Amino acid sequence: MRKVFIMLAVALLPLMAGAQAQINTKKVKISDFTEKITKVVLTGNDFYDIALQDEVKARWRVSPYEFCTWDEFQKDRNSSDFYFLLTTSSQFKKESEPGLDLLSLVKGGTGATINSMLEVVFIPFAPAEDPSGREMVFLPAFLDIIQKHALMSMEKDTDGYIGLSNNSMNIAKAKNMEFVFSEDDLSSEITREFRDLNFDSDMVITDEDSADDYMLENAPNTLVSYVVAPTDAQPGSFCYKMLINSETHELYYFRRHRITKKFGPGFLAEDIRRINSYRGRK
C-alpha cells in the first residue's frame, strides 16, 4: 500500500508543480484587479493633481477608484486589497540621480516597498527635472494605455511580463496612417539627408506645439510621437520612444535605448527604418 501511495504521489508531482506555477504567474496575481479599489495617489502638486483628478474621473473605467494622499498610500500600501496608480521617480543603475518620472500601476502587499510592489504596468511620463508640460497633453492617452494593458495582462501572461513593448506590433496596422513627429523628438541622427531618403508625405515633422495639437484635437488616422528622456541626458540613462494614436489612444510603438556618446535622446535612424519596414516602405 505504501508503495502504491509513493507511486501515486510521484505521478501527481508534475500536475502539482504545474498548478503551483499557475498560481504564481502575474496573470493570476492581478486577476482581482477589476474588483479591487485603485487608489490614485496625489502628489501635492496642485496643478498636476487637479489635472490627474479630472482625467481619472473622465476616463477611468476598469476598476473602482478613489484618490489618496502620499501619507495614506504609505499607510495602505501593505494591503493586497488595493492597487495604486502613482507617479514616481526612477533611477537606473548608471545614473547618479533619478532621471525620469513614471506613471505606474502597482498592487499592494504585505511588507511592500515601492520598489518591491507587484508592478502591473508603468509608462514613462516626463523628465524628473524640468518637465516641459507636454506630459499633461498626453495624460489622457497614458491613462487609457495603462487601463488597456492591465486588462490584457489579466488575459495573457505574455502581455504582463513583456510590458508595453508588446504594443509595438501595432505599427503593422499603420500603413495608411499619418505619422507626426515633433522636431524635438528626433535624435541628431535624423539629418536633413536622412529625412530626404526616409521620410515621405505621410511622415510629418513639425514643432512641438503643432504636434500636440493633433493629440488635443483627437486627429483621426494619426500617430503622434512622444519621447521621454532625462533633461540632462548622460550616457547610461534610457530614452523611451512612443507613437500614440491621437484618436483612439492606442500605443503603436514603444521602444527604449540606452543613451551613449553616439546615441542621444530621440527617435534614432534605426527606429525610423524599423517603422518604415512595417509600413512596407524600404
Image (cartoon, helix red, strand yellow):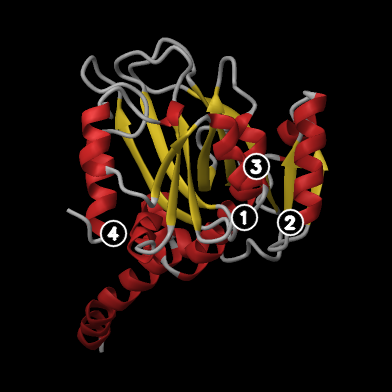
Q: Which residue is mark 2?
A: 59
Location of residue 225 in the rendering, given as x and y in whole percent from the top left corner: 46, 41
Q: Secondary structure at mark 4?
A: loop
Whole-angstrom CA distance, mark 4 to mark 2, is 31 Å
Judged left or right of residue 33, residue 3 is: left
Frontmost residue, 116 versus 219: 219
Frontmost residue, 33 versus 235: 235
- CA neighbours of label 2 inside 10 A, class few (<14), some (14 to 19), many (20+): few
Q: Label 1 sits on what residue type?
A: Asp
Q: Residue placed at 51% from the left, 61% from the top?
A: 221
Q: Which residue is mark 3?
A: 139
Q: Label 3 sits on what residue type?
A: Leu
Query: Looking at the image, is mark 3 or mark 4 earlier in the sequence?
Result: 3
For discs 1 and 4, the disc positioned in front in the rendered view: 4
Judged left or right of residue 97, residue 212 is: right
- CA neighbours of label 1 inside 10 A, class few (<14), some (14 to 19), many (20+): many
* Residue 131 marker: none
Q: Secondary structure at mark 3?
A: helix
Q: Label 2 sits on what residue type?
A: Arg
Q: Label 4 sits on what residue type?
A: Arg
Query: Looking at the image, is mark 4 or mark 2 earlier in the sequence?
Result: 2
Location of residue 178 in the rendering, given as x and y in whole percent from the top left corner: 44, 54
Question: Does the residue at mark 3 contact the one at mark 4 (Cβ under 8 Å)?
Answer: no
For discs 4 and 2, the disc positioned in front in the rendered view: 4
Q: Which residue is mark 4?
A: 279
Q: Secondary structure at mark 1?
A: helix
Question: Does the residue at mark 2 contact the one at mark 1 (Cβ under 8 Å)?
Answer: yes
